Image (cartoon, helix red, strand yellow):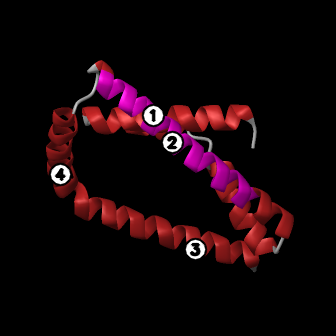
């Protein structure tokens, strides 16, 4: 857990908050690109497969400290944005309506992609263990 990791995670959370408030899929994708959480998640998976207790412990510690911290800072920033009038409940309600329409149109395709990705990941993990 480094200050740079935490900073990038907070930036990713802030970008995702803006993406939700503005109903911007592009901003949400940007948040996913900036987010550094893949490394500890991958380390956790590798540690579990290799039965490396130190790697598992460090990964869980990183995730357990960084995610609540990023969520708290994003919550504080959101409250500040509301107080400054940059974001309002109406923005989120409008975004929710747009997201509902968007997600309904793409739901079947996303479920199919998720299932195929999960199967591919499982096959890769099984091949690595063999």
Instruction: Check residue 68 for magenta coloring.
Output: yes
Gap between marks 3 and 1, in whole Å? 38 Å
Judged left or right of residue 21, residue 52 is: right
Judged left or right of residue 107, residue 74 is: right
Q: Earlier in the sequence, mark 1 or mark 4?
A: 1
Q: Secondary structure at mark 1?
A: helix
Of 59 and 90, the residue lying toward us: 90
Gap between marks 2 and 4, in whole Å? 26 Å
Residue wearing tag 2: 72
Q: Can you say whether 62 is above or below 8 in the image?
A: below
Picture quadrant of residue 84 = top left
Q: In x, y percent, where is residue 51?
A: 82, 75
Query: Which quarter of the figure is the N terminus placed in?
Result: top right
Which mark's residue is nearer the viewer, 2 or 3? 2
Which mark's residue is nearer the viewer, 3 or 1? 1
Q: Earlier in the sequence, mark 2 or mark 4?
A: 2
The answer to whether any part of residue 119 appears in the image is yes
Q: In x, y percent, where is residue 91?
A: 20, 33
Q: Residue at x 62, y 42 (%)?
A: 36
> Within 10 angstroms of label 3, few (less than 14), some, or many (20 or more) residues?
few
> Within 10 angstroms of label 4, few (less than 14), some, or many (20 or more) residues?
few
Residue wearing tag 3: 122
Q: Secondary structure at mark 4?
A: helix
Which mark's residue is nearer the viewer, 2 or 4? 2
Q: Earlier in the sequence, mark 2 or mark 3?
A: 2
Gap between marks 1 and 2, in whole Å? 6 Å
Residue wearing tag 4: 100
Residues under numbered marks 3 and 4 in contact, where contact means CB atoms less than 8 Å apart: no
Furthest-bottom residue in view?
A: 130
Picture quadrant of residue 6 = top right
Residue range highlighted in magenta? 59-83
Residue wearing tag 1: 76
């Amino acid at each position: 857990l480094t200050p740079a990791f935490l900073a990038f995670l907070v930036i990713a959370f802030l970008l995702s908050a803006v993406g939700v408030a503005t109903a911007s899929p592009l901003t949400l994708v940007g948040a996913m690109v900036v987010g550094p959480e893949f490394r500890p998640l991958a380390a956790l998976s590798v540690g579990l497969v290799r039965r490396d207790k130190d790697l598992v412990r460090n990964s869980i510690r990183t995730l357990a400290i960084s995610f609540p911290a990023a969520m708290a800072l994003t919550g504080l920033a959101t409250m500040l944005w509301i107080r400054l009038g940059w974001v309002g409940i109406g923005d989120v309600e409008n975004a929710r309506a747009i997201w509902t329409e968007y997600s309904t149109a793409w739901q079947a395709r996303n479920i199919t992609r998720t299932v195929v990705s999960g199967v591919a990941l499982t096959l890769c993990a099984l091949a690595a263990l063999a």
